Amino acid sequence: MNMNSSVSNASVSIKDLSLNFGSVSVLKDLNLDINDGEFLVLLGSSGCGKSTLLNCIAGLLDASEGQIFIKGKNVTWEEPKDRGIGMVFQSYALYPQMTVEKNLSFGLRVAKVPQAEIDKRVARAAEILQIQPLLKRKPAELSGGQRQRVAIGRALVRDVDVFLFDEPLSNLDAKLRSELRVEIKRLHQSLENTMIYVTHDQIEALTLADRIAIMKSGIIQQLDDPTTIYNRPRNLFVAGFIGSPSMNFLRGELIQSGDGIAFTANGVNFSLAGYDASETLQPGRKVVLGVRPEHIKVNENTGGEEHDATVDIEEPMGADNLLWLKHAGHTMSVRVNGARRFNVGAKVKLSFDMTVASVFDAESELRL
Amino acid sequence: MANIETLNTTAAASDAVAPKLGEGPRGARPRPALSGRNIMLYGTLIVAALYYLLPLYVMVVTSLKGMPEIRLGNIFSPPMEITFEPWVKAWAEACTGLNCDGLSRGFWNSVRITVPSVIISIAIASVNGYALANWRFKGSELFFSILIIGAFIPYQVMIYPIVIILREIGIYGTLTGLVIVHSIFGMPILTLLFRNYFVSLPEELFKAARVDGAGFWQIFLKIMLPMSLPIFVVAMILQVTGIWNDFLFGVVFTRPDTYPMTVQLNNIVNSVQGVKEYNVNMAATILTGLVPLIVYFVSGRLFVRGIAAGAVKG
């Protein structure tokens, strides 16, 4: 976790934030620094506190403890409008009785911005989001994608420092979701604003984020760039949460084998040669070995250690082909090229790429 | 048909049931208009409708007859000679006590009671409901509970204390006093109604308005109010009918010259002197009930929509 104490160069800074609803603690001593222009994704399953954190940053919820800084200014007690934030909601939250134009300009009209300036800003936002033809329509006459564009526009016209997205794509169908995802990324590249984005969709997180904060029960489990999160998960939860299908976990222990260290489970030994922190591993320790489905090779004579397995189920997914294999009492998922097909019951040889595997302590669940 | 059947058969050649396609029922299932189910359903509805309409029919018919015709005793027979005299008498000439200007005085009293009571109670209750739904404050749940309990306390318990309070303030017997009483007594149920409606509106809308910088009143007036027409219609109907039909408060808190229409109607119908003028009584009753009736007819559709609005999230 990033425990940077200086607030000046960070766009959004959260210090020891706690939030309780009655006796239920939703956020616990949370610290987070978000850099200027960064795209940060808060990722987690429902109830992990990610939306609560976003609402705290927006000022829609009052923190029980701690402070929030935006652009170096302590905004812990400020009203949402004075925080320099714009927010996009999952349900779009467009004012149903107002036209798109009025929706976009509502905040400016409330702030008594001169009409000429309002027109200019609305026109600019409409151009960026390509919604000029929709300006005179009511929200009910728009499609889901158009509504979400207007919702983004509402944050855009107010010239805010920080954009907050609360699961903005969850109500859209799959095709539209991937289209708008690209658009949000493009928007971020052209505006270079700080953006904080809440989602439970790991694809959105991995594709959009500069850094991802994975949350569970009000605590940030890992805060890193998507590649690090994917390849070097800090603990068992992160490893299992990211990736679809999720990482294969084998429970066993470490043993000394020849001059190196190895992992043993159900009487089968796996050489850990090539694991990046193999020198810190001590024999006798109970561990969990995690290997991603695409890091297991099937029938590719790599020259290294090979394991026998049986194909149990085959799930062709187009580009990929997902195999569920039985191997020494474990069920394992393996991703192979979609062109390679296997018969159920076929005997195959597996080789594990330990350079990208993860080893976790069985007790602390932390990466070793 | 044969062609289509062959096509179907070829399309699903491997399927064992395929040759049977094209035979048997297809399309919408026929529903006979005179099925036992329909006869039961519409029969019951018609009987129920007649049951409720019959009294109204008798009232209208009787009010259009002269007294000699009424004495014949055929209450269901239509009038042989239509006369509007009972209506005129009921409206402008019937005597109650010393006043002999019919229901018209009571009508205008009722208007002067109902209009301000409805406006004041709805205005306050809608803001109450909005605050309780969206601006939760410390103790707001307790406040709400107390308010709801108020809805369940019998009015009779509070009559005497209120008489004393109004007397002490010096507005006992005035229309102002009655308006205040009606506004207060409408508060629990109306607040509940408005709170539940505002709770059913998407919370994100409220959040979006706050992020946009709108305050308490701006959100209420510019965002919430335009979305709340159905519930305002419901509240209005409840209050107009409730206050217009009220008898108890009217008779307790006003004096003869400020009696509302219901009290006046009672005095006309129940006067013990002279002959019972059934036609005048019927006309007077219809006149008194006319206002709520019109309100229902004009806004009934919105009423149903408003009542249903809380149940289904749209």
Image: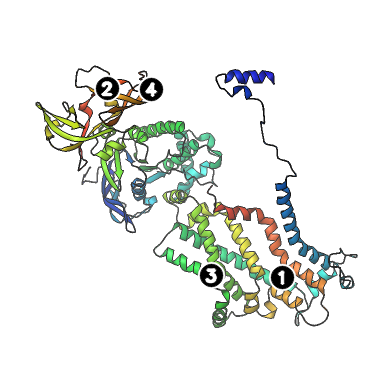
Distance between mark 1 and mark 4 Cα atoms:
80 Å
Q: Earlier in the sequence, mark 4 or mark 2?
A: 2
Examine the image and state in which quarter residue A281 appears. top left
Q: Nearer the viewer, residue A36 or A355?
A: A355
Q: Position of residue A286 (x, y in %)?
A: 17, 38
Front disc: 1 or 2: 2
Q: Is residue B1 visible?
A: yes
Kind of residue indicated by mark 3: Phe
Q: Position of residue B128 (x, y in %)?
A: 50, 63
Spot the residue most to the front: B16
Q: Residue at x 33, y 39 (%)?
A: A41
> At numbered mark 2, what does the secondary structure look like: helix, strand or loop?
strand
> At numbered mark 3, what does the secondary structure look like: helix, strand or loop?
helix
In the picture of the structure, the residue carrying the numbered disc 4 is: A319
Could you say which disc has been placed on residue B152 in the image?
3
How crowded is the residue under tag 2: few (<14 C-alpha within 10 Å), some, or many (20+)? Answer: some
Examine the image and state in which quarter residue A317 appears. top left
Q: Earlier in the sequence, mark 1 or mark 3?
A: 1
**Which quarter of the rendering shows the N terminus of chain B?**
top right
